[in-house]
Amino acid sequence: MSEPAIDIDRGDGRSRAARYWRIARPLVLLLVAFLAARIIIALVGAIDWSSVWSSVRKLTLPGAIVLLLVLLARQAFNAVPLAKFVDRLSLPRSMQNDLGAILVGTVAPPPSDVVLRVSMFRSWAIDPIEGMAGVTLNTLTFYVVRFAAPMLGLLLFAFVEAESGHAWAALASGLIATVILVALVSLSRGDRLARIIGLTAGRVASRFRHEVEPEAWSTTVVEFRARVGDRVRTGITPSLLALTLMVLAESLLLLAAVRLVGVDSEAVPTLVVLSTVLISYPLTLFPLMGLGILDAVLVAAWTQYAGIDYEAQIVAALIVWRVFSLLVPIFLGVVAVWWWRRARHTASDAEPWPLPDEAQPDAS
């Protein structure tokens, strides 16, 4: 769990092939996603791209402002867990940290985003190890919500249709979310349970990588639990709630895009849009929020519901959504990093990390 910090500070002895794979993995997954998208869309039918662009041009300035406001709400909800898990980190700085990581993680190979996060934590007089522990908790919490989203989608689907495939997919995803949540909550239950979790995970991993030492994994998990145990206890509930609202905001962002390009509720009802997004949400596990494969699944599902005449408009809606969900955050990341660098160079009262002993926050 603490591997990101180890990679930056002292290296973890991975082979050159493993390092190359770490850089190439997102590209490979993205290629797989595009191949899957091509196969799925081919099953729907050929896309009339001139009609797609005509639909995109239906987006007006007021509509774009609405999309931007929903996006900002999404980013605010997304930043809540890090602010809850990292002591003395405000919500605006948490948003700044997240947006900066999005920018750097998009334009540079890993672990460049971790380097930026650590630099930001240090400039704010926050222990970078504590900060990265909070990032890890943030990631685990998001995985819980990501895999729990289909359960909420299944509830919405009950009002429009009932397919056994949706039910089984949602239940399987919900089981994954439950396992992650149990492991996350267990971190606050004491060193003994943390040691068991570390040993078990290490033994499983050692069957695939012989250099893994279960005892070392156990020690790492115990040390990690000591840093984050209390924060899991106090931060898990508001974090899960905030990330659930973030997923709903993402769904509303896509719903707004669908409506703004001319797909009305008679063609694709609101509940169908929202439930399909939630059922398919685990596909955001792929790079760039499932770019390619998630889009193809949504196009296929909604075109099947509305009819082939709406295919171009549905594709246009997804293009608009991707612009606001992927490209606009990158621009916001540029602003966030610029603002951080400006504040770091102009602040006269900032103290470098670590703080002097008398300025250290009370651990109690």
Image (cartoon, rainbow, N blue to C red):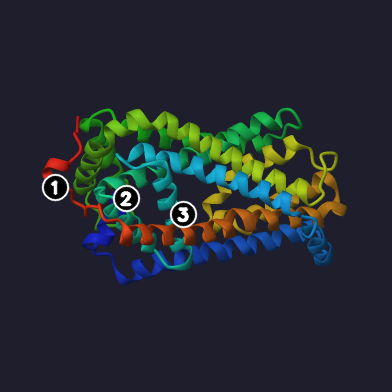
Q: Which label's residue is closer to the chain start, 1 or 2? A: 2
Q: Secondary structure at mark 2?
A: helix
> Given the image, on which type of amino acid does mark 1 rest?
Pro
User: How busy is the neighbourhood of tag 2: few (under 14 within 10 Å), some, or many (20 plus)?
Assistant: some
Where, by quadrant of the figure, is residue 20 drawn? bottom left
Q: Which residue is more in the foreground, 17 or 116?
A: 116
Outermost residue, left direction?
357
Q: Label 1 to label 2, Cα distance in Å?
A: 40 Å
In the picture of the structure, the residue carrying the numbered disc 2 is: 205
Residue 9 position in % (x across, y down):
23, 60
Residue 52 position in % (x across, y down):
79, 61
In the image, taking residue 11 as reference, residue 253 lies left or right, namely right
Where, by quadrant of the figure, is residue 119 drawn? bottom left
In the picture of the structure, the residue carrying the numbered disc 1 is: 356
User: How busy is the neighbourhood of tag 1: few (under 14 within 10 Å), some, or many (20 plus)?
Assistant: few
Q: Which label's residue is closer to the chain start, 2 or 3? A: 3
Quadrant, the C terminus: top left
Q: Which residue is more in the foreground, 173 or 92?
A: 92
Q: Residue at x 41, y 34 (%)?
A: 181
In the picture of the structure, the residue carrying the numbered disc 3 is: 99
In the image, taking residue 29 as reference, residue 69 lies left or right, namely right
